[in-house]
Image: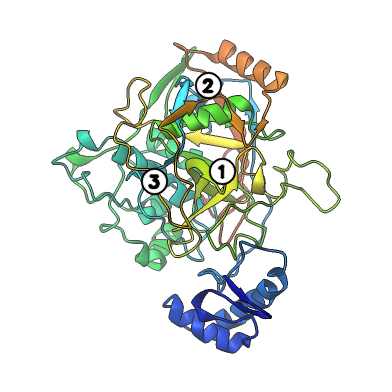
Amino acid sequence: MIQLFNTIQLNCEINKNDSCVIAYEKFTVCFNKSKSEVKQEIFCGSFNKLIQLLPTCQTCDITAVMDIKRKRGKFIDRRKKNVVTNCKNSLQCAIVNPLTTVTQVYESIDLLEEGLMTTPKDQGTCGSCWAFGTVAALENCLLVDQSHYTGTIWQKPVDLSEIYLLTNAVNNGFCEGGDFLLAINEFDLLTNLKTVEKENNFPYSALSAANLTYQSNQIYSPTVAVGDYLIPYKQYNIQDGIETADVGGVVVYFDDNKRFTTQAIMDIKSYLSRGIAVVAQMSAESSLLDYYNGENYVHASCQCSQSSSNYDNCMQNVIDHQVVFAGYGKKDGVDVWIVRNSWGSSWGANGNFYVPIGENSFCIECSAIAVVPKHYSGDNLWQNLVSHTRGQRWQLDADQGPTIANDGVVSGIKVSLSVAAVIIIAVVCGLFGIAGIGLIIFQVQMCKRRRSGVQTIVITQNQPMFMGANPMANPM
């Protein structure tokens, strides 16, 4: 954004003094958008709000999502249960982090820069962020393990299908919402998802047709040969008495009352330095993301309401979007997470955004869930590191050295590990540890979101997930 006297030149050669009609014309050309009266009305509302924000917002500019209206919903709420009952039939099983905390991590790492993530994709107006976050994690597994897939259909270029997941993950809600952990465990517990699938076999452009398939209570059969079926992450066999389950989801951190502890920051950096992505959840209600220009980090306090003074316990009413931690480092001297979004690569910093570490911006530091690539072993960091000299405005700062101590210190502030968190982790691991692996069962409530995609789903031990013949006919 260039400021000259009283004139502000925005992205797409739009001036703040342009009428919204003129601005919309430039916008559609700039982002190759189709025109409609409805989209123009949405854009004009967004444009007027942007003009109001400009005096105080250094990260605000014209972005590709300003003609999309997101429906507001309620919240995601995961609550830990200390009962390992009926895990075999539960979609909410996950294991406590099985990987050790490494003592030396890279000073910074960007998984897209390292070739360990694909270019961010665009979910459009479908509430499918859960599917895009899940597919991003699955693609990351394939890219980390590429040496094992040479000569197979899973070698580069990697591009997995969100549509196949949307349609076949029947315990999620298609465009009405879902969750990464639900989707991952459907690969384990149901026959609908025997394998990942390729984007060119089930393209996202066929969203409308896939919705009809889903609404008619049908699923897609895989097109890849049976011999090529693949679930690209580790599955941990958990036993409790007579119950047994293969669990893929790994809880790196979860606490709906507190932001990331020092240990959580260290563990997430350990995963990312290994090249492994970590899925997160956040509040996308702040308009700062709609106008984010990708040139700096962006911060919005995690507050439940205007009257709330609690900046951490905000899971209720605000969590509505699933994203992926895709790296970390410094941005203008501030320690930041790189967060992969699903609003396309023309938004933000090539589809990503930066948030300060330890600030719980957008309530993003309450949950960190992952899957471990199928062939990963040991505690080695990612070995094929590219140059980190960088230099582009949208990139992280250049590194001073290859590795640093993994001590959880960020921007001069050390986030303390709470006694309560230590006790909870110790109790969970002590009660449910099987060969060093702990087990957590979640109760999940997901909000309905047209754009960000979270649906109200309450799962209890003795209660069916949905009512009616169609699993999604009567969501709770």
Q: Which residue is mark 3?
A: 389
Residue 376 sits in which quadrant? top left
C-alpha span from label 2 to label 3: 41 Å
Disc 2 residue type?
Leu
Position of 262 relative to 333 (above/below): above
- The residue at the point 69 percent across, 50 percent down is 318
Disc 3 residue type?
Thr
Dot 1 crowding, Cα within 10 Å, few <14, some 14–19, many 20+: many
Q: How many labels were placed on the picture?
A: 3
Label 2 secondary element: strand
Residue 373 sits in which quadrant? top left
Label 3 secondary element: loop
Q: Position of residue 55 (x, y in %)?
A: 72, 69
Closer mark to the observer between disc 3 and disc 1? 3
Q: Position of residue 199 (x, y in %)?
A: 30, 56
Q: Position of residue 18 (x, y in %)?
A: 62, 86
Position of 130 relative to 90 (above/below): below
C-alpha span from label 3 to label 1: 17 Å
Label 1 secondary element: strand
Residue nearest the viewer, comparing 103 with 364: 103
Position of 141 relative to 83 (above/below): below
- The residue at the point 59 percent across, 47 percent down is 355
Chain-order first, disc 2 or disc 1: 1
Q: Which residue is mark 2?
A: 439
Q: Which residue is mark 1?
A: 336
Q: Is residue 277 visible?
A: yes
C-alpha span from label 2 to label 1: 30 Å
Chain-order first, disc 2 or disc 3: 3
Position of 467 relative to 41 (above/below): above
Residue nearest the viewer, comparing 62 with 100: 62
Residue sitting farthest toward the left? 151
